[in-house]
Image (cartoon, rainbow, N blue to C red):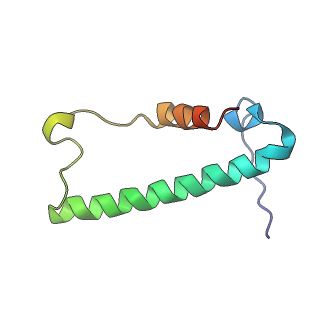
């Protein structure tokens, strides 16, 4: 395995976990972020082809995901 050093603020949600679990949680969050990014790319392609409604179309008009709130919600999923 390779090592990655990152700097995050001291109030980051990953610090809610015990030191022995932080690395595992951070890896899971990174993996989830990569998967979500891939889903966004695929969805954008579908929207371009007209195979999926645009995010602001239909009954979801004007509704967008707030990234900060989403991170908080996702962090809450992993709370012990």
Q: Position of residue 44 (x, y in %)?
A: 29, 59
Count of numbered circles on the image: 0
Left-right relation of 29 to 44 = right
At x 71%, y 38%, the residue is 14
* Percent coordinates x, y for residue 42 in the rendering: 34, 63
Decide which of 30, 6 is in the foreground and name it: 30
Q: Name the residue at 56% across, 31% down.
A: 72
Residue 77 location (% of width, % of height): 58, 36
Q: Quadrant of residue 10?
A: top right
Q: Is residue 8 above or below residue 53?
A: above
Tell which residue pokes out farthest to the bottom in this image: 1
Which image quadrant: the N terminus?
bottom right
Q: Is residue 37 toward the left or the right of residue 10 in the image?
A: left
Kindly identify the residue that appears in the image at 54 percent across and 53 percent down: 33
Residue at 27% in and 64% down: 45
Compared to residue 42, the image places residue 80 above or below, namely above
Q: In what quadrant of the picture does the C terminus appear? A: top right
* Depicted 7 relative to depicted 50: above or below: above
Q: Return the residue found at the far right.
A: 20
Q: Residue furthest front?
A: 80
Q: x, y percentage for residue 41?
A: 37, 61
Closer-to-camera residue (80/59): 80
């Amino acid at each position: 395995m390779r090592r990655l050093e990152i700097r995050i603020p001291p109030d980051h949600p990953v610090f809610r976990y015990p030191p022995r679990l932080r690395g595992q949680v951070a890896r899971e969050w990174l993996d989830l972020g990569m998967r979500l990014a891939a889903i966004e790319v695929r969805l954008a392609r579908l929207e371009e082809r007209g195979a999926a409604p645009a995010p602001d179309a239909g009954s979801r008009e004007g509704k967008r995901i707030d990234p900060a709130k989403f991170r908080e919600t996702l962090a809450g999923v992993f709370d012990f």
